[in-house]
Structures are given as structure tokens and as C-alpha cells.
Image (cartoon, rainbow, N blue to C red):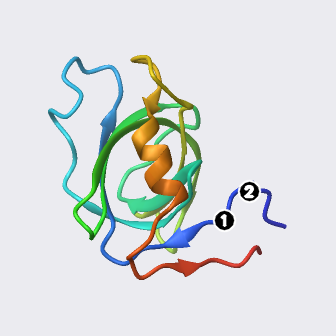
Amino acid sequence: MDRRLFTRVEIPGAKIQYKKSGVKKMLSGLSKPKEIKNISKSGLSFHLDKKFAPGEQIAMKVQFPDGNNFTLKGHVRWNNSINSADVYAVGIQFFPYGTTANYNPLSALDYLRNMEGQALTKISPE
């Protein structure tokens, strides 16, 4: 049973660059771009070659094929090994949206609510 509150979508070409939170400059030291597997207004998932602990805070730059980019913050909700001990699926839950420094920008929420003009594929609940 899928316990997610919001519909996830696949957007071919959407990418994420990430790093563990806590480094002073938000976008310095980001990873190489990785394909986003699916995304909703509450979070996203992607594959990587290392394991993060649930609860670990992540800073990320999310890039969409239509040219929109957002700097977001969140935390690791889950991670699972995929067919190998060297590849993990990771689920990130976004921090709340708002107008202070501890929140994600409201412009990102508006964009995620209305992702139009991209090749969206809705993912059916499991």
C-alpha cells in the first residue's frame, strides 16, 4: 500500500544535485547531477552510490528540463539497496515551504503544484 499523500510524477530529464546540510555555502560542494526517479510537492526519490541515514538533512538543487531550477532543503526519509550493495534508492521529504530561511521557497511549491509543459507520467499507487 502506498502511504504517500501526494501524487508522484516522473519527469524525464529532471536532475538533482545534493549534499549533506550544514556546509556554510548552500550550493558549494554539490554532487554531480543525478536523474530524479519521481517527484511530488512533498519530496522526491533518486538513486545514488552511497547510503544516507534516515533523518539526515540534505541541501539540493533540483533542475527541470524546462529550465526551472530550485534550491531546496529536506531530509532522508528512507533508502533501500537496489540489486547491489553499491546502489541505493533514496527518498527525500522536503522541508515545509514558507518565507523564512528555514523554509523552502514558496515559488518552488507553486511550480511543483503546476508542473505543466513537461512529459509527466503519473505513478499509480502501489
Residue 71 in view: yes
- Residue nearest the observer in this picture, 118 or 18: 118
Would you call the spot at circle 1 few (<14 residues within 10 Å), some (14-19), or many (20 or more)?
some
Would you call the spot at circle 2 few (<14 residues within 10 Å), some (14-19), or many (20 or more)?
few
Residue at (44% x, 54% y) in the render: 111
Mark 1 residue type:
Thr
Residue 58, image x, y percentages? 41, 35
- Closer to the observer: label 2 or label 1? 1
In the image, taking residue 124 as reference, residue 73 lies left or right, namely: left
* Contact? badges 2 and 1 (CB < 8 Å): yes
Most distant residue in the right direction: 1
Mark 2 residue type:
Arg
Tell me the element at label 1. loop
Residue 52, image x, y percentages? 46, 42
Residue 47, image x, y percentages? 42, 63
Find residue 7 and name its label.
Answer: 1
Say which quadrant the N terminus sits in.
Answer: bottom right
Which residue is the site of mark 2? 4
Residue at (27% x, 69% y) in the render: 66
